Image: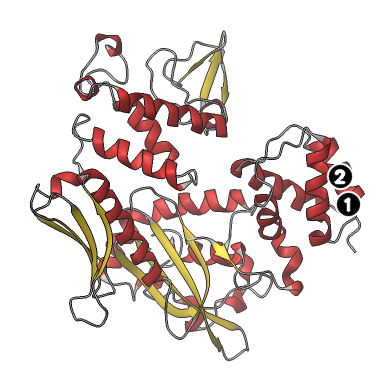
Amino acid sequence: MDAYIFEDDLYCEDCAPEGCHSYPDGGGEADSPHHCGTCMVPLENPLTDDGVNYVLEAIEHTLTEDPAEWAKVYDVYKDTYYEGSPHVTIVREWAEQIQGYGLPDPAVELVDEFLERTAKAAGVASLGDAVGESDTITFEIEDSSTSVTMFKKSSGEYQIWSIDPHGAVENTLEYTSDDRTKALLYARRLAHGMRNEIRSKWFPYELLAEWTDEDPDPNNEMELYLFYPDKQDRRGKEILAYRFYDGPYLIFEGMDFSPSPLHAIDSPDTIASLLNFLSLDEGDTDAEYFEDYSKEQIEWRDDRAENLKNSLMDFQATFGMDGFDADEEGEDEVDSPEDSRIGKLSGGLGFSEVRPADFEQNFPGVIVPVLRRHEGLNLHKLHDRKTIANALAPTLGVSEEALLHYLTRNHADIAMNETNMKKLAVAISAWMRSGTVKIH
């Protein structure tokens, strides 16, 4: 959402005074969430590390309040976006925003506990509503006979078990707590983790890469798993297998994707290319492309393909890719049934070491892991810039002095958080490809 600045305050488009200049991303990355200065609508700006800490502190403070305060509706919100909303609504929205920020485990647990405990006050269905004080709740895991079950013992303890109803493995006690909310949250996280572990295995094929849109709701999270079956088409091109899930549902599965030879088979570019095909909608290609789609796949296309397109654009922006055009692959890339028809499967992002032959195509994928090992450094400090240059120069094959000079002239004002690391990786990649730097 664009934000408009007037006299040191931010406004949404509807409330902005005439003559204001607009700024993308809610006014840009900041140390706290932005709201319109008139109607209080959230402007959805990205947060710095300090901004995430601001939200976590607000969550901790809210949890110290009397729970009766959470559901109260205050006149101060009259004639604003939050009119009639419970007092806790604003902090809940902030908490939901930072769920996609790669929080450490203690922060994840704090956010989950906060959202669960305040759900009833906010008028949201709580996970705890699914189980009574002495009932049993089971989280089924598709593609497997295993499930996660929580029940309460007569002693008052809640026990979490992973259970195989067919007896292939022993039932395992995973967790015990006398706090029902914490037990439910643990059971949900355990089931989700087990589901992802199952999805990432397709024996005997090697898992190449994973991608996810990082939706905090497991029921809406899109995932792609890319596998290497060690097969080639009639022209000797690699054929990859894949599975694509939307929440609990397997949407596409196939062993028919031939990636461009210009990119490593486990690179972000290959993932983006496959996602582009999976997101095709009516009007994007000929009608016969969808002839083999099932009724369920057609319904998914009409309802969710646009969401996948938007997630793909975010992914491409992260790695500095241009928008993908199927025509760029050339007619020889789509002249066989294996290439032109995407099958029926599903899939999160990680990829293996880049092959030397494809090195230049994957600069961001090489750079980001190195930068992550130095998270927390500040490039306004000469010592920290030297540390980054020393660690990164050998990997890129450039001189440490040249890289240090580049960082000093262009990026001596940023902190090494996750967002800035990705932006820096894209900038360094552009510098590497500019022809102004000598690569050994």
Residue drawn at point x = 21 percent, y = 37 percent? 124
Residue 209 lies, with reference to residue 67, above or below; the image says below
| Residue at (61% x, 79% y) in the render | 332
Could you say which is closer to the camera, residue 182 or residue 334?
182
Residue 99 visible within the image: no
Amino acid at pointer 2: Leu
Q: Residue at x 63, y 65 (%)?
A: 328
Q: Quadrant of residue 323?
A: bottom right
| Residue 281 found in image quarter | bottom left
Residue 427, numbered label: none
- Of all residues shown, which one is farthest toward the bottom? 234
Dot 2: what SS?
Answer: helix
Residue 201: x %, y % from top left: 42, 76
User: How packed is label 1: few (under 14 Cα within 10 Å), some, or many (20 or more)?
Assistant: some
Which residue is the site of mark 1?
400
Which amino acid does the dot numbered 1 rest on?
A: Glu
Task: State the residue position of label 2.
Answer: 404
Question: Measured from the top left, where is residue 76 in percent x and y?
Answer: 29, 9
| Foreground residue among 304 and 249 | 249
Say few, some or many: other residues with alpha carbon within 10 Å of mark 2 (under 14 / 14 to 19 / 20 or more).
many
